[in-house]
Amino acid sequence: MAPADRLDLLLFHAWLLAHDAREQEVMRPFPPLGIQYLVAWMRRHGMPATDWFDPSFDPDLSRFWGEIADTDPRVVGLYGHTVTRPVAAEVLPRLAAEGRRIVAGGPDPTQYLDDYFDMGVEVIVIGEGEETLAALMDHLRAHRWQWEPAELPRIPGIAWREDGVVRRSPPRPLIRPLSRIPWPQRERRDLDRYFDAWRDRHGETALSMVTSRGCPYHCTWCSKQVYGDTFRRRDVDEVLDEVEDLKERFDPDQIWFADDLFTINKRWVRQFSQRIVERCLVTPFYVIARPETLTPELCAALKRAGCYRVYISAESGAQHVLDAMKKGDTVEHIHAAGRRLRAHGIELGVFVMLGYPGETRRDVDATLRMLHALRPDVTLLSVAHPMRGTAFYDAVSDRLLPADAQWVQDHGGRLPFEMDYPPRFYDLAQRMIWAETALVRRLRAGQLDAETARLAVKAPALRLGARLAARPRAGSL
Ligand code: B12
Ligand code: SF4
């Protein structure tokens, strides 16, 4: 975008890697697909002066403000996510003070309508963004870039505030089939910094794409504001056309299919596996899967297609915790999935969650034993984080603590609630799991060195510490 070209719409996500210790550790960054989808849709919709700004690798927001000054966008659109709210809170009031039209979408604003309106957002898009954002832009263009409140109720899928009262239009039907949506607008200039970050950390590059939208399951802690319980899937060959395009234009070393449920439909995966081979497009990729979907046949199909790692949402080694989360899955399935993936030469990634209400110290031990048996290649650990709009949030709503900025910072960005055990217990439990997984990894790699010995000593000591710190509040253990 040449300076001084005025934009109609500038989209951005208020996320800076520099502020995100967890992502710095993981360092598997990807450009935000939602925003790239919207840019593609808007340009096709006859709004070529649409662009997005990516502050992900910037140390601060100075380049963002430079972009705002240079492109002087008529409308600014924010993608809001639970972890991006603090930066949004910094940016939005200043944009509002400049008199800009501001719209927002994504999972967070839907649940915090008033907060975002207070920060300066004028209209919030609820759910899928493409058609609604285009309708809003048409509305603004038709009204000399001013809102016409009397017409807003006729634009499905939005919320706005009028005379201090939040109003909503009827929901907008989802886009069907998904092939109506153009592929995300990916441009080399946006990808280079991602590729550099990947190369520096992992020695190779990666890109993400999705083959579906939504998930029909009901895990209590999962935030499903955008697609609800719906599920739509793209045609296999249309997905492979996009894979082909990615390979031709950017040649990534690997792909992440960022679907919620890549493996939900066996027939689809079988067909995908067959066609990717037939079309000579096999590329290393990884996916997330529910353990119970990983039958031997499905693992074989994934392997043939190029899948090198599957992350399973295991969460806990205690069945009653899985039941409380409404995972609809069993510990036995988790173990079976681990065995089958290994048997097919696919690496295992495991998501684990600590601190779900009702989880006892013994349950944490069970999770540890499960990890021991699974020996995952990667373990991604999180502490239960109630997000508004989820059943989990509602269940702990009487235990939420005041989320002032300092508290959030001190607690690693987690939304605070009074957990079953004191914070020290969870700190120790996390360190215990990290120490054990590091130990297992080293032992598996045959590294019987001083560091391994140190970890072997440390793990039981941490376990003892956690045991001592486990001073349960009423009702636990
Ligand atoms: C990819 C992904 C990631 C990637 C992010 C990479 C990237 N830059 O995209 C990684 C792995 C880093 C990640 C990390 C985390 N993620 Co994440 N992630 C996802 C995932 C699986 C897919 C996102 C996606 O691309 N969707 C596909 C696109 C097409 O949909 P979309 O993004 O929602 O966009 C549409 C609409 O939202 C809307 N829209 C979007 N932006 C805008 C802007 C405007 C102006 C408008 C009008 C509309 C609009 O239109 C778009 C097109 O229809 C979602 C789950 C999901 N299914 O969406 C979770 C999800 C977004 N993540 C979530 C969470 C909680 C996290 C973590 C906090 C997890 C953790 N404990 O560490 C971290 C946060 C770190 C971070 N920096 O963001 C939650 C967010 C919940 C919430 N209420 O905010 C989700 C929804 C998962 C869940 N179900 O709980 N994540
Ligand atoms: S955690 Fe996964 S399976 Fe469960 S509801 Fe969320 S996306 Fe669906």
Image: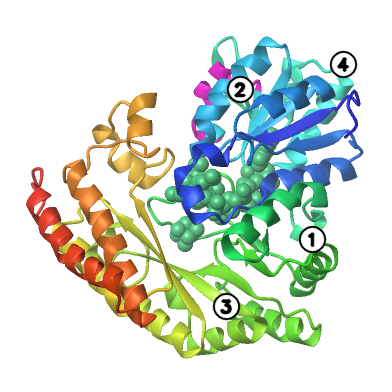
Mark 2 to mark 4 CA distance (whole Å) = 25 Å
Q: Is mark 4 on a helix, strand or loop?
A: loop
Is the stretch drawn in magenta largely helix, strand or loop? helix
Tell me which amino acid carries mark 4: Arg
Q: Which residue is drawn at 31% across and 35% down?
A: 416
Q: Give the range drawn in magenta.
A: 110-122
Residue wearing tag 2: 91
Q: Where is residue 435 in the image (x, y as percent from the top left)?
A: 28, 63
Residue wearing tag 3: 308
Q: In this view, does 199 lie above or below 284?
A: above
Q: In this view, does 10 lie above or below 269?
A: above
Q: Residue at x 76, y 41 (%)?
A: 131
| Residue 247 picture quarter | bottom right
Mark 4 to mark 1 CA distance (whole Å) = 33 Å
Residue wearing tag 1: 179
Which corner quadrant holds the N terminus?
top right
